[in-house]
Image (cartoon, rainbow, N blue to C red):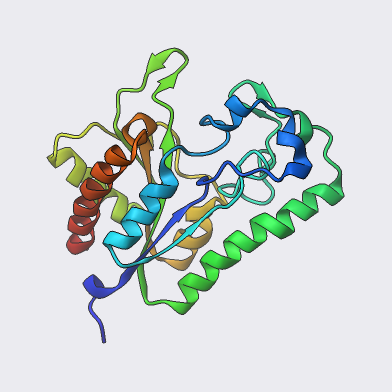
């Protein structure tokens, strides 16, 4: 029987892509908006792939913009298909028909979560790690953290990662800049409900603004995650 330390990690990135099918006509938004943090988590796709390579682990990424449907929400959450994001109105999501809602859920949301469920079922996984990025500026003020570790009531892995980051003198937020205890979100659905070690790592997106920076953060997170896993 394999030891815990030999078990694998599944890396996921709910908001890795800003892809919107041409049929949706950019949801009524400008290209500049679709290339910003309101449409996806900047730098996270490359970070997720880098870490999966460094750990020789699997990864799963969201392939559509969160403006179409937010994969990190419960299916009953009123913000599942957002109508306003960062004070921007998403015109094409207003008064969406039930048919169009069901189509997005069926073709995007359900397929994504089935991939995660299948990966957990078919592999000897030790941990599920979700990767996100956040904007450095909020309400015209710079957020004074480099990383945010989001957790629900299962803090086993999150606490080790926070301790490891603080040991390295990194500025880390505990359930900052967002709360990590949304009922029915990805970590709740696939981590907590499966009693699987899990955490959500938020990276300030100016630290992921080039491939060089992403590789630097990837190498740092590899050490932090590896040391944290080894303490379990």
Q: Position of residue 221 (x, y in %)?
A: 25, 48
7 relative to 191 in the view: left or right: left
Q: What residue is rendered at 18% in x and 46% in y?
A: 164
Q: Nearer the viewer, residue 230 or 133?
A: 133
Q: Quadrant of residue 227?
A: bottom left
Q: What residue is rendered at 30% in x and 55% in y?
A: 157
Q: Nearer the viewer, residue 225 or 193?
A: 225
Q: Quadrant of residue 142?
A: top left
* Picture layout, residue 204 above or below residue 231: above
Q: Is residue 102 visible to us here?
A: yes
Q: Position of residue 22 (x, y in %)?
A: 73, 43
* Picture layout, residue 45 above or below residue 125: above
Q: Nearer the viewer, residue 69 or 19?
A: 19
* Picture layout, residue 52 above or below residue 70: below
Q: Residue furthest bottom?
A: 1
- Name the quarter where the C terminus is drawn: bottom left
Q: Position of residue 15 (x, y in %)?
A: 52, 45
Q: Position of residue 67 (x, y in %)?
A: 64, 38
Q: What residue is rendered at 54% in x and 50% in y?
A: 185
Q: What residue is rendered at 33% in x and 52% in y?
A: 155
Q: Is residue 152 visible to us here?
A: no
* Picture layout, residue 6 above or below residue 32: below
69 relative to 138 in the view: left or right: right
8 relative to 66 in the view: left or right: left
143 relative to 97 in the view: left or right: left
Q: Quadrant of residue 230?
A: bottom left
Q: Nearer the viewer, residue 19 or 177?
A: 19
């Amino acid at each position: 029987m394999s030891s815990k330390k030999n078990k694998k990690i599944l890396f996921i990135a709910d908001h890795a892509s800003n892809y919107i099918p041409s049929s949706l006509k950019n949801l009524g938004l400008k290209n500049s908006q679709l290339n910003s943090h309101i449409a996806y988590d900047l730098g996270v796709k490359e970070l997720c792939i880098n870490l999966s390579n460094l750990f020789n682990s699997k990864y799963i990424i969201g392939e559509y913009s969160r403006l179409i449907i937010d994969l990190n929400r419960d299916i009953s959450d009123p913000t599942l298909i957002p109508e306003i994001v960062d004070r921007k109105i998403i015109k094409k999501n207003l008064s969406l028909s039930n048919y169009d809602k069901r189509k997005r859920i069926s073709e995007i949301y359900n397929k994504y979560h089935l991939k995660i469920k299948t990966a957990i079922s078919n592999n000897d996984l030790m941990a599920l790690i979700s990767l996100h990025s956040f904007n450095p500026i909020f309400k015209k003020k710079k957020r004074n953290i480099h990383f945010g570790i989001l957790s629900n009531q299962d803090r086993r892995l999150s606490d080790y990662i926070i301790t490891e980051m603080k040991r390295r003198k990194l500025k880390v937020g505990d359930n900052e800049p967002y709360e990590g205890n949304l009922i029915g979100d990805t970590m709740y659905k696939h981590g907590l409900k499966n009693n699987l070690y899990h955490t959500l790592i938020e990276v300030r997106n100016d630290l992921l603004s080039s491939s060089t920076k992403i590789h630097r953060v990837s190498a740092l997170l590899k050490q932090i995650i590896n040391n944290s896993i080894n303490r379990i």
